Amino acid sequence: MPLSRRRVLALGAGTGLAAVSTGLLVSCNSHDLRRGGTLAVGLPRLPDVLNPVYTTAEPARWIADPVVEALYGYRDDTTIGPVLAAADPIIAPDGLSWTIRLKPDTRFHGGDPFTADHVAACLRHVSDPATAGDWAPYLAGRLGAITAPDPRTVRIELPRPFGVLRVFLANLPIPHLATLGDPRALVGTGPFRLVEASGQLVRLRRDEGYRGKAVPLDAMEFRPVADGVADLSRHRIAVYPRPTPDQVRRLHKARDTHVQDANGPADLVVLPNLRRPPFDNVGVRRALAFGTDRTRVAQDVYKGAAVIGQGPLGPGNEGWDAEYTPYGRGVSPTASPKPSASATAGPTVEPERVKAAFGESTVPPGVHFTLAVVTGEAPELGDVARILAEGWNRIGFTVTVEHIDAGAWAARRRIGDFDVALVDNRASSAAGRTGFAVLSPAVSTSTDNTGYLNTEVDRLLDEAWATADNARRAKLTRLAAEIVARDAVVIPPVYPKIALGRNDKVESIDTRLLASGRLDLAGLHLRD
């Protein structure tokens, strides 16, 4: 049953003690930094769901992270260390049992002890298909019995080895078990606690009983803003995450505003439906991949703030190989149709390879299909879709573009009601730098599977998700991704950089965590 607002705030109103998660700061001159004050963060809209066991959406995560901590956390963009856990998990030799000891004397903001019962309840919630919500593609059915032998010990039994679980444990916040039934509740052990949540404002206040190093800010406020660039320039807000490409251009020109960015994973992808002809034909899919106008997308939409898409893994993913370039790079621009005036360098499409792929398919050019564009947090997808459709129309396809919202896409994806989709997954806040999310359409047992069946890919990824060795997982993932690229199952046009806008009223933010979908605000200082 959802908690009343009074009960939620009561749970978070005490002298809670919490584990440290104050964030990484870029080296800077400290003479103008100050303690105290309120950090204002602007978002296009405030999320309807705040409880992190229900959602993996980035805006909700940015709000929840200072309040609700995870068992483990990122020391940088690759290294994971204990936060609420006392040490690394103890993994049985067969990989089927994990034992996690918790730090002593940790308390929730309302004063309740943080115990193994809270961890066990949370893990059961996110691994049960009936309650997992956004966590279902990652954890549903992956965990077995979860027990709390004593208040400081959690034991997780697994049906099969799942070494990548540690990544998810670093991305899964553990809220108070009494809040698991309420999507709007936010009660944790972090350095801030929730004091107000409405459609126009979410306000967090520093918890004075925080057991770790005291954070510098008094409070944080998250507000919906119509124009993040204008509000940064006028100092109404200090941070604006994920500006659109157009907003990035404006930020570069505006006074007292700055853009920080990081290479991201392969979140922006084209997904052919292999259960629907002619995309069950690998030759047709390859024609689609070779005809993808990556250069125009990179230049016209992202103005160079993107890497040309190659395989399913992007520069922010484990297993990324900068030397792997199956598409576009190295092909003479003179072999392509004349590029648009704004596409000033590099090939736009690869017509000879498109022709060869159609020949391989025995399907004549002229294939008609509908490109479903999933709108949501990335409004620039409309421009991406237009450019892709123009390129495909030039090389033998006839494309109709259809815009659908995320809810409609989820329903249609479940029943396979689409030809080709353009989606922005933004899944790294759950899966970290792994390729777990972007490769799931190629896994035959995944709920995200688009009709592809390749036993070698299944084997490689089973081994990748089973191992706890990061280097081995990266190698296995890279091998699987090259097969998936060869068969044109997941086609990223580009890998957009992940950007963040700020003004001079806040110190520079360490961007290394951005590639993992994280925005660590808790340890920031305001500037005079």
Image (cartoon, rainbow, N blue to C red):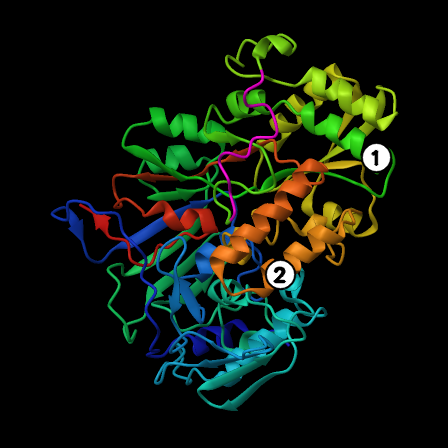
Disc 1 versus disc 2: nearer the observer:
2
Read off the residue under disc 2. Answer: 463
Q: Which circle marks residue 281 in the picture? A: 1
Magenta stretch contains residue 276: no
Q: Which circle marks residue 432 in the picture? A: none
> Quick one: SS at disc 2?
helix
Residue projecting furthest to the left? 31
Q: Position of residue 320 (x, y in %)?
A: 51, 43
> Which of the two residues, 394 or 47, is positioned nearer the viewer here?
394
Q: Main secondary structure of the magenta part?
A: loop
> Quick one: SS at disc 1?
loop
Q: Residue at left 73%, top 14%?
A: 394
**Left or right for 441, reference 302:** right
Magenta stretch contains residue 321: yes
Q: Quadrant of residue 179?
A: bottom right
Which numbered disc flags the more N-terminal residue, 1 or 2? 1
Q: Residue at left 65%, top 10%?
A: 337
Q: Position of residue 373 (x, y in %)?
A: 69, 35
Quadrant occupied by the C terminus:
top left
Q: Quadrant of residue 423?
A: top right
Inspect the image, locate mark 1, and give the three-letter code of the amino acid beneath it. Answer: Asn
Q: Quadrant of residue 103?
A: bottom left
Inspect the image, locate mark 2, and give the three-letter code of the amino acid beneath it. Answer: Glu
Q: Which residues are magenta?
A: 319-331
Q: Residue at left 57%, top 38%?
A: 378
